[in-house]
Image (spheres, helix red, strand yellow):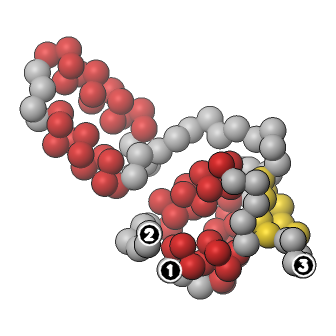
Amino acid sequence: MNEGFSTFERRMQILSILMNHKQISRLELARRFSVSDDSICRDITALSRFAPISSKMGRYGGVYIVDEFKSTKVYLSRDEEEVIEELIHTLTGKKRLLLQTVLYKFAMPK
């Protein structure tokens, strides 16, 4: 379903999922991204360095983020960046500059 993401993109998608859903299992995350449970564990460990992510074991367990957390940065996916780059070339003047600014603000660090 979400194949082809870089590790960084996958982690940003996981963070987005956690902010939009109350809780999700590691197994479900592994299925969504077609990666191993170990990869998800590494992702969660990396994300927990800057976001308050916790996990619970058991029947009603899973990975979750505290309700008060709000990410201050949103990144574009690779596909979104490509579409914007294509659109930039069709514009001129102020509109072109504005769209370039949007791309600069929200493009993933390279």
Q: Which residue is depicted at the point 48% across and 60% down?
A: 9
Gap in angstroms between the C-alphas marked 3 and 2: 27 Å
Q: Secondary structure at mark 1?
A: loop
Residue at point 51% right, 73% down?
33
Q: In the displayed structure, would residue 4 be above or below residue 74?
A: below
Q: Earlier in the sequence, mark 1 or mark 2?
A: 2
Mark 1: amino acid = Ser
Answer left or right for 61 relative to 2: right
Which residue, given by chain and number where applicable, does mark 2 sit on? 2
Residue with the mark numbered 1: 34
Q: State which quadrant residue 95 falls in.
A: top left
Whether 17 is drawn above or below 34: the answer is above
Q: Quadrant of residue 40?
A: bottom right
User: Taking 2 as reference, is 91 left or right?
Assistant: left
Q: Which residue is mark 3?
A: 58
Using the rendered view, name the quadrant where residue 6 is placed: bottom left
Quadrant of the drawing holding the N terminus: bottom left
As shown in the figure, which amino acid type bears the numbered disc 2?
Asn
